[in-house]
Amino acid sequence: MTKGEIIVSLDIGTSKIRAIIGEYNGSTLSVIGVGSAEGEGIRKGSIVDIDKTVQSIREAIEHAEHMVGIQIDSAFIGITGNHIVMQPSHGVVAVSSPDREIGDEDMDRVLQAAKVIAVPPDREIIGIVPKQFIVDGLDEITDPRGMVGVRLEVEGSIVTGSRTVISNLLRCVERAGIKISGLVLLPLAASTIALSNDEKKLGVVAVDIGAGQTTVSVFENGSLSAISVLPIGGDHVTNDIAIGLRTQTEMAETVKLRYGCAMVAAASQEVTFKVSRIGSNTDKEFSQFDLANIIEPRLQEIFLMVRQEVERMGFVKEIPSGYVLYGGVSCMPSVDKLAEYELDAPVRIAIPDQLGVRDASFINGVGILQYAIRNYMKRVHTHTAAPSVRKTGGFLDRIKNWFSEFV
C-alpha cells in the first residue's frame, strides 16, 4: 500500500510511450512504477495513427498498474514538438486589494492580461512563461506576492501550439481511458530535474535527443528563453546501421542499444556480434569499431545541427553553463565526449536520481512528475477532470488553465 499521494505522468515519444507512477510524501518524490510500450502510430513526434497510439498508451498504463498494483485513472501529459512556438508578451494590471498587497488574484489577472494577444485560428494559446515581474517600475522580480504596489506588470513568452496536434494528443489519451490532469511543456518539465538553478540563471542549452526528433531549449536568467525542434534523432542512427550492416531495422536497433558507441576512438575491435543480413542465409560478424564508424558521422551531424540552431535562435556567444544532454541517444557510451568536441563547450549527461530510475531517457517522464508537484499540487484538487474531447468542442479553452504559468 502506498502512503503518500500518487501522481502519474505520461510521456508519449516516438519510440516509447512511458507511464511513470510517483509517490509524493510532502517532501520527496519516489518513482514506484514504470510502464513502457512501443510508440506505435507515432512518427517524428507526431501522431499518425490514432488507434495504434491509443493501444500503446493502454499497454504502458497497464504495465505500470501491474507493477504497483493500483488502477490509474488520470495522468499529467507531456507536450512538445515543432508546432510549439514562443513569442514575447507583456501584461499590466492595477493591484486590486485595498492595502495594495499583491496576492494570487493579482498574479492570475496579470498573467491573463499577458495572454490577450492575436493568434492565427489554427493555433491555440497554451500558457505563458514569465521571465520577470515589475512592481511600480521595480523589475527583475521572480515572485511579487506579498509585496506592496500599485501597478503590476509581467514580461514573458506566450506558448502556442497547433490545435490539430493538441486535439489528436488529447483524443488518444482520453480514448485510452485516462483523464487528463494537466498538460506540461516537456522542456520545462525536464528542466526541474535535468538543470540546476545556477545553470538556468547563467545560461544553458538543454538537448533532448529522442528517437524521432531533437528538442533544443535555451534557458537564461532562470527561465526558458527559446525552444526549437530538429527533425532528426535516434531513428536516423538506427536506419544508418540497418543500411550499413544490411540488416533489418529491428536488429539494427538491438545492436545499437547493446553495442553502440558514439566515438570510433573509444570503440573496441575485440567486442564483436553477429547479425542476420538481408538477402543472405548466413550471419555476419562485426565489431563495435565497425558499428562506431556508422554511428559517429550521424551523431556529428546532429550536434552540428544543434549548434547551428542555437546560433540561429540568437545565442551566438558562448553559453556559460554549456550543454546538458538527455533522452535515449544520450545513454550511448562516449556521446558526451563527442558532443563536447563538436559543440566546443562543456557537456554533461542528465540522469534522474529518483528511487528506481537511473536512465537519461526517463528525464521527461520523471520531470513531468516533479513539475506537476511544484505547480499543480496546490490546485489539482480544486479543478475538475478534463472533459472528453468527443463530447465538447471547447476543451482547448480548458487547457489554458491546465498549463501552469509559474516556472
Image (spheres, rainbow, N blue to C red):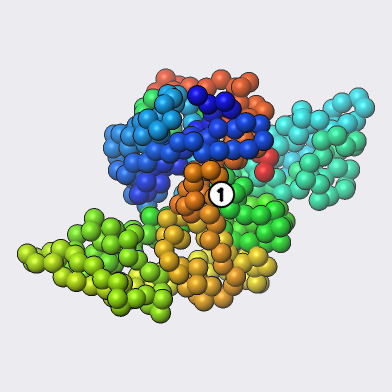
Up/down of 341 relative to 332, above or below: below
Name the foreground residue: 142 vs 256.
256
Say if 333 sits above or below 150 in the image: below
Residue at image location 77% in from the left, 30% down from the top: 104
- Residue 231 in sight here: no
- Label 1 sits on residue: 353
Q: Estimate the x, y position of residue 47 in percent, counting from the top left.
A: 36, 42
Q: Is residue 197 visible?
A: yes
Position of residue 176 in the picture relative to residue 400 (left or right): left
Judge by depth and name the residue closer to the eye, 109 or 382.
382
Is 238 located above or below residue 391 in the figure? Answer: below
- Res. 202 image quadrant: bottom right
Q: Where residue 88 sits in the image (x, y, percent)?
A: 66, 50
Residue 75 on image: x %, y %: 49, 31
The residue sitting at 65% across, 65% down in the picture is: 321
The total of numbered circles placed on residues is 1
Q: Is residue 203 left or right of residue 393?
A: right
Q: Residue furthest left?
A: 281
Q: Residue at x 45, y 69 (%)?
A: 334
> Residue 302: where, in percent of width, then height?
43, 67
Q: Secondary structure at mark 1?
A: loop
Q: Quadrant of the C terminus?
A: top right
Q: Is residue 179 left or right of residue 37?
A: right
Q: Is residue 264 above or below residue 9?
A: below
